[in-house]
Image (tube, rainbow, N blue to C red):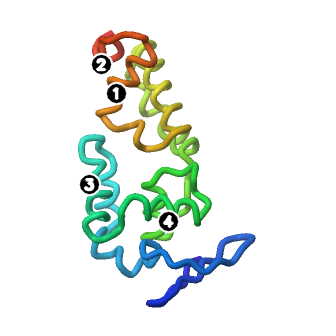
């Protein structure tokens, strides 16, 4: 549970109570950034525009470093930044990245060849270990080279 006023924030989580001065956790500022959960989901679901929610936060004075501090404070290091935002803004339960992958994996892998599934599993495992940055399109060439030890980037996994 999160309580706050203008000067301080009282964060109560199972097992501890802590006063925190972290503007991002003052969710009074977040409604103007993310008007609805649907808006946040829509922005987050596409790897092409996934950075938009983070840019919106940054433009309002909440850099990614603040979101990562909030992630630490609410004991969500293994959760996606999306889940952290949902928790803070919409009071949703936190999922770990592993829980998120398990929840979506069947839908993700349903129409893929075995080689494509192998690559997607590799990417998802990186996401579970390292976080959301592993899902950005700009990381795919590096991931492909790492997985297949080749300079042929996306064609190796996507065109098989």
Circle 3 SS class: helix
Which one is nearer the viewer's eye here, 18 or 84? Answer: 18
Left or right: 156, with 59 as reference point: right
Q: Is residue 46 above or below residue 37?
A: above
Query: On the rendered image, what quadrant is the C terminus found in?
Result: top left
Spatial CA span between label 2 and label 3: 24 Å
Sequence-first tag of 3 and 1? 3
Sequence-first disc among 2 and 4: 4
Q: What label sits on residue 87 in the rendered view?
A: 4
- Mark 1 secondary-structure assignment: helix
Disc 2 crowd rating (10 Å Cα; few below 14, some 14-19, many 20+) is some
Asked whether the residues under the numbered discs 1 and 2 touch, taking CB atoms below 8 Å apart as contact, a structural biologist would say yes
Q: Nearer the viewer, mark 1 or mark 4?
A: 1
Residue behind mark 1: 140
Judging depth in this view, the residue of 64 and 76 nearest the camera is 64
Q: Quadrant of residue 102?
A: top right
x and y percentages locating residue 47 in the rendered image:
30, 41
Does residue 56 appear left or right of residue 16 in this picture? left
Quarter of the image with the N terminus is bottom right
Image position of 125 with respect to 27: above or below: above
**Foreground tag (2 vs 4):** 2
Q: For the residues marked 3 and 1, what is the alpha-carbon distance in whole angstroms?
A: 19 Å
- Crowding around mark 3 (Cα neighbors within 10 Å: few <14, some 14 to 19, many 20+) is some
Q: Answer yes or no: do the residues labelled 3 and 1 have beta carbons within 8 Å? A: no
Query: Regarding mark 2 in the picture, which secondary structure is present there?
Result: helix
Query: Circle 4: is it few (<14), some (14-19), or many (20+) Cα within 10 Å?
Result: some
- Figure check: 34 above or below 128: below
Sequence-wise first label, 3 or 4 = 3
């Amino acid at each position: 549970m999160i309580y706050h006023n203008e000067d301080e924030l009282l964060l109560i989580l199972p097992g501890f109570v802590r006063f925190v001065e972290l503007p991002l956790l003052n969710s009074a500022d977040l409604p103007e950034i993310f008007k609805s959960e649907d808006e946040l989901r829509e922005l987050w679901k596409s790897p092409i525009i996934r950075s938009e929610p983070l840019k919106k936060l940054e433009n309002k004075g909440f850099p990614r470093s603040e979101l990562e501090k909030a992630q630490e404070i609410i004991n969500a290091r293994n959760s996606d930044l999306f889940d952290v935002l949902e928790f803070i803004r919409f009071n949703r339960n936190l999922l770990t990245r592993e829980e998120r992958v398990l929840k979506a994996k069947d839908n993700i892998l349903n129409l893929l060849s075995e080689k494509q599934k192998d690559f997607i599993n590799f990417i998802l495992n990186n996401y579970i270990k390292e976080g959301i940055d592993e899902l950005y399109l700009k990381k795919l060439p590096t991931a492909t080279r790492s997985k297949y030890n080749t300079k042929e980037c996306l064609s190796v996994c996507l065109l098989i």
